[in-house]
Image: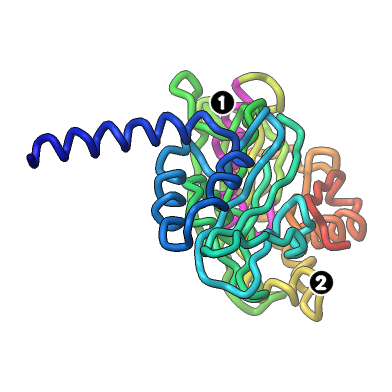
Amino acid sequence: MRTKFSLIFLLTSLFFQINVSGQSFDEFLAKLSAVSPAGKPVMIQKYLSVQQAIPIIESDSKVHFLYVGKAATVAIAGDATAWVPSMNMKKVDGCDLWYATATYSPDTRLEYKIVVNGKGWKLDSLNQLVVEGGMGRNSELVMPKYEGPLYVNEKDVVPWGFYIDTVIQSKYLGEKRKIRIYTPPKYEKSNTRYPVAYFHDGFEFFDRTAARNIMDNMTFDKKIMPMLAVFVEPVHRNDEYSGKLQAKYTLFIVKELIPYIASHYRTLNTPENTAQIGISNGGNIALWIAATHPEKVGKAAAFSSNV
């Protein structure tokens, strides 16, 4: 009897999975609405268990975001909503399933969070894709035709650059400052002089953007010239980048750090071979230093700058 029951249960479950996995989300909702409140949780759990990935993507462009839990309101905030929780999720009557449907280009990649009751910003617990960003961890949606970045991963055939961490004393800031210095592959075996890029929010920039991999890979593919890179760690970030310490921080970069690098490394110490780079408020200080000291800095890159 027990064997027979187990076989019947297995066949029933298998039939249900095949049936569910082949249906559209709208068809699932229609069937769910016909089930009693007591049977809805089991049906939802079985439906979720056979999905290859959540959010559910249909026809290369339609996306169904799902959330299961008790709440008064649930919304999506992310790249597609300018990080405003404006994509409201709809609750299915008689259960704790919430959903929202959107349409995106098949080559889209975006980050998002689920916002519960207007204030609880959470990762999507049903989505296994999580990425690190400048503002922390986010859930990730990757559409079927998205092509990932070419240069962020290590490649066995690519020689690695080398980096060291050190500390220098600044008289302008009145304190020590941590920096990370990257030298390109084969630096030690050559007499070449190199351009230099200075990155603000340095250690975070280095870790979160795979900066070393990108430089190594792009150098190997001859997309960029070999270069030195200096990653500068902020201490009083907002004050240094756009506040009361901006002038002193600028002098630290221009009158202390750039000369320090030039005296310790083989650099092309000219404006056209010196760049300042940053994200958000780091982009602000990169632009500021380049604009106020063109005799030292000839290039700037500001990503999502706040100016």
Where's the C terminus, which quadrant?
A: bottom right
| Colour scheme | rainbow
Task: Name which quarter of the figure residue 246 lies in.
Answer: bottom right
- Label for residue 242? 2
Where's the N terminus, which quadrant?
A: top left
Task: Name which quarter of the figure residue 256 lies in.
Answer: bottom right
Q: Is residue 163 left or right of residue 104?
A: left
Q: Callout 2, which amino acid? A: Ser
Crowding near the residue tagged with mark 2, few <14, some 14–19, many ≥20 C-alpha atoms within 10 Å: some
Separation (CA) of disc 1 from disc 2 = 39 Å
Asked if 42 appears above or below 151 in the picture, the reply is: below
Q: Callout 1, which amino acid? A: Ser
Does residue 192 appear anywhere in the picture?
no
Q: Position of residue 96 (x, y in %)?
A: 52, 64
Viewer-proximal residue among 292 and 102: 102
Asked if 189 appears above or below 84 in the picture, the reply is: above
Tell me the residue that label 1 is attached to. 190
- The residue stretch that appears in magenta: 199-220
Asked if 51 appears above or below 241 in the picture, the reply is: above
Q: Position of residue 106 (x, y in %)?
A: 71, 30
